[in-house]
Image (spheres, rainbow, N blue to C red):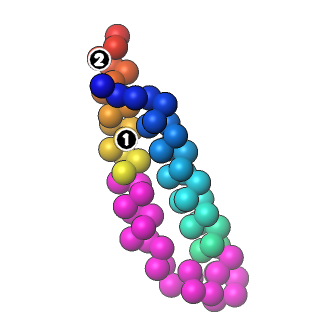
């Protein structure tokens, strides 16, 4: 069974982390900092894949309730 609250909470965590990474990259671009070298891409891609999987679960759970 899909626990919507847990999925929503994890999606919020993923969103916040990706936003933090994007902000760090933006700041680094101004000063040629460490994040400017796309070192965060692997983590961001992993988080995006996880978010996609969670959204699929959430959608499947919602569709089965109808």
Instruction: Report the magenta residues as a range.
Output: 27-49
Q: Which residue is mark 2?
A: 64
Image: 47 above or below 66? below
Work out whether residue 29 or residue 66 is closer to the camera in this orientation and state it: 66
Local secondary structure at mark 2: helix
Which residue is pictured at 39% across the width and 63% down the height?
Answer: 45
Could you say where residue 64 lies in the image, as x and y percent from the top left? Answer: 29, 17
> Who's the residue at 64% across and 67% down the image?
23
Identify whether 26 is placed above or below 9: below
Residue 35 against residue 13 in the figure, above or below = below
Local SS, label 1: helix
Q: Where is the C terminus found, in terms of image quarters? A: top left
Q: Quadrant of residue 53?
A: top left
Task: Please give the name of the residue rendered at 37% of the width and 21% of the height, measured from the top-left corner.
Answer: 62
- Which quarter of the figure has residue 24? bottom right
What secondary structure is the magenta-colored segment mainly? helix
Residue that protrudes farthest toward the top in the picture: 66
**Hey, which quadrant is residue 43 in on the image?**
bottom left
| Percent coordinates x, y for residue 4 in the rendering | 44, 29
Q: Is residue 30 left or right of residue 7?
A: right
Query: Would you say residue 34 sits in the magenta stretch?
Result: yes
Q: For mark 1, does the 10 Å Cα neighbourhood hold few (<14), some (14 to 19), or many (20 or more) residues?
A: some
* Percent of width and height locating residue 54: 37, 41
- Tell me the residue at 46%/79% (across/down): 39
* Mark toward the start of the polypeptide (2 vs 1): 1
The crowding category of the residue bearing disc 2, from other C-alpha atoms within 10 Å (few below 14, some 14 to 19, many at least 20), is few
The residue singled out by tag 1 in the image is 54
Q: Position of residue 48 (x, y in %)?
A: 41, 55
From the viewer's perspective, is residue 44 above or below residue 37? above
């Amino acid at each position: 069974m899909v626990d919507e609250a847990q999925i929503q909470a994890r999606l919020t965590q993923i969103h916040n982390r990706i936003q933090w990474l994007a902000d760090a990259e933006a700041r680094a671009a101004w000063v040629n900092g460490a994040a400017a070298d796309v070192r965060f891409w692997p983590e961001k891609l992993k988080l995006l894949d996880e978010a996609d999987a969670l959204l699929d679960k959430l959608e499947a759970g919602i569709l089965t309730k109808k």
